[in-house]
Image (cartoon, rainbow, N blue to C red):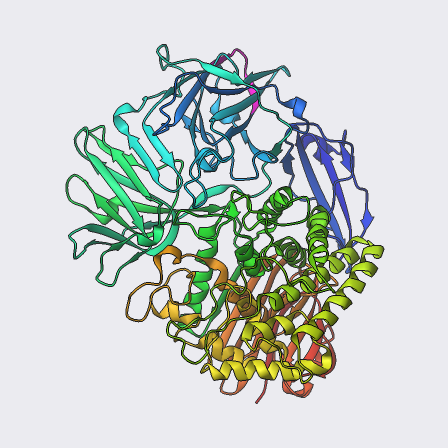
Amino acid sequence: MQTAYEIRVGTDVASLIKDKKLVWTSGKVMSDSSVHVAYKGPAMESAAKYFWQVRVWDNRGNASSWTEPAYWQMGLLHAGDWKAKWIQAGFAEDTVNRPSPLFRKTFTANKKIRSAFAFITAHGLYEAQINGHRVGDAYLTPGWTSYKKRLQYQMYDVSDLLTTGTNAIGITMGSGWYRGYIGFTNNKNFYGKDQSLLFQLQVTYTDGSSEMIVSDESWKSTTGAIKSAEIYNGESIDARDEKQGWSTPSYNDNVWSGVKVVDFPNNNLIASYSDPIRKHETFTGLKVITTPKGEKVIDFGQNLVGWVVMKVNGKSGDKVTISHAEVLDKNGNFYTENLRAAKAEDQYVLKGGVEETFEPHFTFHGFRYIRVEGYPGELKPENFTAVALYSDMKKTGTFTSSDALINQLQHNIQWGQKGNFLDVPTDCPQRDERLGWTGDAQVFSRTAAYNMNVNDFFAKWLKDVAADQYPNGIVPFVIPDVLNFPVGSTGWADVCTIIPWNMYLAYGDKRILESQYHSMKAWVDYMHKQSRDDLWNTGFHFGDWLFYRPEDDNDGRSAVTDKYLIAQCFYARSTQLVINAARVLGKTDDVTSYSDLLDKIKNAFLKEYVTASGRLVSGTQTAYVLALNFDMLPESMRAQAAERLVQNVHSYNDHLTTGFLGTPYLCHVLSRFGHTDVAYKLLLQKTYPSWLYPVKMGATTIWERWDGLKEDSTFQTPGMNSFNHYAYGAIGDWMYRVVAGIDTYDDQPGYKHIKIMPHPGEGLTSAAADLQTYYGLVSSHWKTDNGQFNLDVEIPANTKATIYIPATDIKMISENGKPLSEIKDIQSGANENGYVVLEAGSGKYHFAVSK
């Protein structure tokens, strides 16, 4: 355990090592805090670079050496720091195809360069080059935010790209989310009609002098090879019009047009908050398929999001068209009907004479298959590489088990997250939608935080949730809000309370509660104002979206849950989360007032929706799950309600019937009330509706519908049938937290106090989960063998763990072959519900429970 730390900060490595002219030192601070420690030194300067080190002391009398110096770079802290001007192309645009404009500027550096940093943003998307080299490895920059309120800029260290003498800057732009087609109503120009650039390069020379090169009247513009680029429709490139070497100093730009300087405010500019979109896994084509229609199709074996890089050799003017699809139809033909209006098509016209490589710049596709038309010569799969694009979130969690189908389910959950966490948490990546649906994000957020580090990803997006929230507290259906529909639906709008709390639990960073607290309260206050007699039973709601509905329902098997019962449950849940946040933030008055409100909400629920015997007016799985998970029932009614839930599950032959809002909590509720065996039956169920049905049907991602592909290989309604729609992947949370048993406690969130409580069940002989926390690796691996239960646990330094061993007597348990009574560092407590409870510190443990 850490007992103290010391941090020091300087403007260069030498100042740190010599311990002179430091910007700030914390001194020795007696504290066990080792994450989320705030800088408390003098105000920092715009664009300055700061180096830092830390050393710690532990409870065994050890002191560490200073860490290797690390650094951070400041952005531009004030609107006045921007000296650049917004510029637009100086030529008349083709307003139909909207070819990508190119911007160019040359300048001379007469001295030796010490450092150079570029600050870039745009209305639209941009890619930058300096002296013929790409700037950075981020894509689809500046990302998607509520642009008029929050427009991100990126900062790049370009010191290695510049030379003494003449240098050239080149910028390519695309319409992107800013003015391209967005939403599903053929909308374009949502944020504006322009494509504008803001560029600022800050150069510091070795003699200490500096220079600034900015976007202004001196730049030039033209168009090049990119003839059109739309997110939904794809990109068209004509290599014959490529301006070879256009971003190098020697290029002749005499025939280029000038630029227009335009006036836009800079008070909405913010430094990038979350991880940039980068390239990740690549997949070479597995095989070329000739479909029954005679089309040439390549299968990459994985439904993914990104684009295809193509190598080709042909004649000048040859045109190759690549179309994208997630699935083949019943007959094996290329299927695009579920893309709706999205063309998802890239076109390339060859320059000819040499091998050429093509890839898009300002679009992305959701696909497993591509159709290739017009390819000259033999179509070989090795000439096509699919590249996965998603936000560069560090992988943190793994889950494996003894069941191959469950392992494939986990694979599908993770790929659903990769495909849809592309700067915003989209609902689907392939059709004419790809919007930040709030309901999808909130139900999956806890699972997301196991698979990857999404702390910054959600912190960035939640700031847009607050920015686009209406003054009366309504949270739109999608964020950024491109629908302009001022209605708040239960389970969707509650994103503003649920995700901040889930992120606080996962990472222990209370800044997310501080920044979102006003938004959280505003939504609860809106529901309160809409309520009568403490019942929120008005307005539009999506309800338990995509719940189980047989096509020919002759005996009332459709699992329809009263929308207002659902609304009352989420009203209570959001109120509880405001109370939780208020406690963390020390807002005692709010704790009192919202606690009083919560009592009234729950009492109103009992009067309106619960009979005297404890039966709910809606008898669905979702109704009982929400009532139990959100503690809507008094203690005395909960056991019988859980039994009614179990009987409902059995009445559907051990199948789930839940939609988006009930599914995330279904297995959690069953386990909480002693029915883990039923939860296992649901998890391992292989027929529709179930989590494993899509796996059995060959899915490599999570589907939007339980039966997107039916058993006879026909499809659900094409208007809403995505095969990469992550919401139902929320079962991953239960697999990590309950099956493997890794969880955190509210008193010390972020895995400072760790809970290890595995739940072995029939159907699995082993399960293993690893989670990289801010403190280090947490592991829980269990296996049953010949009646013996084995559990391997790893707990990182500076944390503590409460470990639940499934046993009836402590004498049955050994650790590394020794009886627990001989292990001094492990404290044993009382038995609880078939578990022996232990308290332990950091280390690796091997527990065995005898028969």
Front residue of 167/847: it is 167
Question: Residue pushed farthest bottom?
Answer: 851
Front residue of 224/636: it is 636
Residues rendered magenta in the picture: 106-117
Is 59 above or below relative to 28? below
Is 388 above or below relative to 244? below
Front residue of 817/111: it is 111
Name the quadrant of the N terminus.
Answer: bottom right
Is 480 above or below relative to 162? below
> Which picture quadrant has residue 153?
top right
Q: Is residue 85 magenta?
A: no
What secondary structure do most residues of the magenta stretch adopt?
Answer: strand
Front residue of 390/50: it is 390
Q: Is residue 114 magenta?
A: yes
Provide residue 268's location: percent of width, then percent of height: 62, 31
Determine if residue 346 is in view. yes
Number of numbered tags placed on the structure image: 0
Q: Residue at x 68, y 30 (%)?
A: 14
Provide residue 590's location: percent of width, then percent of height: 81, 56
Q: Residue at x 55, y 39 (%)?
A: 145
Determine if residue 511 is in view. no
Name the quadrant of the C terminus.
Answer: bottom right
Provide residue 398's location: percent of width, then percent of height: 51, 62
Is 435 above or below relative to 72? below
Provide residue 325's location: percent of width, then percent of height: 31, 52
Is 595 left or right of 790, judged from the image as shown?
Answer: right
